[in-house]
Image (cartoon, rainbow, N blue to C red):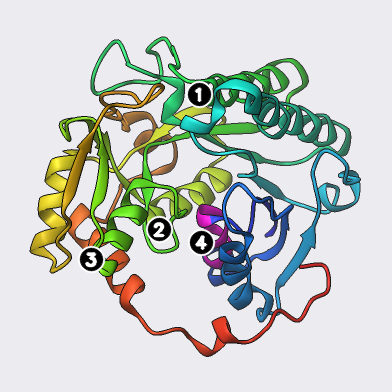
Amino acid sequence: MRAVVTGAAGFIGSHLCEHLLACGDDVTGVDALTDYYDPGHKRDNLRPLLARRRFTFLRGDLLGLPLDPFLGGADVVYHLAGQPGVRGSWGPEFAVYLERNVLVTQRLLEAARRTGLRRLVYASSSSVYGDAEAYPTRETVRPRPVSPYGVTKLSAEHLCETYRTVFGVPAVSLRLFSVYGPRQRPDMAFARLVAAAGAGRPFPLYGDGGQSRDFTYVRDVVTAMRAAALSGWAGVANLGGGCEVTMNQVITLLSELGAPVRVIPGGARPGDARRTVADITLARRAFGYRPATDLRTGLAAMVLAATAPPTALRARPLHRSEV
């Protein structure tokens, strides 16, 4: 299968590329290497991919790149590119979120319509629900995001559904619930917790620690993305980890894993939902989704990856000029 992955150098995107290559797919990765966080992390993610024979990397902004040439030869596009982060989406930065999450998606859908793309899998977010009306939350619950970021993810999701129903673009939107694992973005909670534990630094906790999430391991997510692409099903589905856990429980579990963290309590931040819990019945029925990684195993993998010595691949400079 010939796949295009947008946002290929990011946390989930790089794991997805690895999974697709392991399955024997030919992969073209596209990424602008934006500076929302240190692009060096993204270059580290790319290094092992660039050594793979079936992987091609294209650096560029999807708002300006000619899309038809690489979409026309693809069987599936996994659209993970975008501007992440709830807290940064307020104020003047909203314009960036609008461009990278909404306008880019609309442009990609227009190209998919022109080229007759066989499959488009869009990485949506549980942020579209905000403080949901019911838990576990089904896809039929009315979305009501509590952050501008959530608004843009929902807008892009609506675009996917509109192009699917009006023009027949075979789009799948997967609402991802708090994805974690090795190489997680450095601004995300688990990455900051593990880094604080390793450095012996205190960890500033937003809120009282009673806020809960349906944490989902990255390998389960990328496996589900490919399964959804192969299934023939289209629409909107949740991808959760199958277990609701509070931040206080996560901190206790890290201590049990030998990575204790000293917490400094702070106030809750605007746009953070109090609770997320996914009903994954639809994903299970539509494409066989069953999360296989429990939180202890996934967190242990993060701690192990954070304490592993640098590899030769990490030390070797990138060898492609476009990176």
**Closer to the camera, 314 or 241?**
314
Q: CA distance from mark 4 to mark 1?
A: 23 Å
Kindly report the secondary structure that dominates the magenta region of the rendered protein.
helix
Residue highlighted by disc 3: 200
Per the rendered image, the range of residues in magenta is 11-18
As drawn, the label of residue 111 is none
Q: Is 278 situated left or right of 167 in this image?
A: left
User: What is the crowding at mark 4: few (fewer than 14 residues within 10 Å), some, or many (at least 20)?
Assistant: many
Residue highlighted by disc 1: 150
Residue highlighted by disc 2: 219
Along the polypeptide, which appears first: circle 3 or circle 2? 3
Residue highlighted by disc 4: 15
Are dots 3 and 4 in contact, CB under 8 Å?
A: no
Q: Provide the secondary structure element on which disc 2 rests.
A: helix
Give the image location of residue 214, x and y in percent.
27, 37
Specify whether residue 16 is painted magenta: yes
Q: Is 210 situated left or right of 238 in this image?
A: left
Residue 137 drawn above or below residue 301: above
Along the polypeptide, which appears first: circle 4 or circle 1? 4
Which quadrant of the structure image shows residue 45? bottom right
In this rendering, the label closer to the viewer, 3 or 2: 3
Along the polypeptide, which appears first: circle 3 or circle 1? 1
User: What is the crowding at mark 3: few (fewer than 14 residues within 10 Å), some, or many (at least 20)?
Assistant: few
Are dots 4 and 2 in contact, CB under 8 Å?
A: yes
Residue 145 drawn above or below residue 258: above
Kind of residue indicated by mark 2? Arg
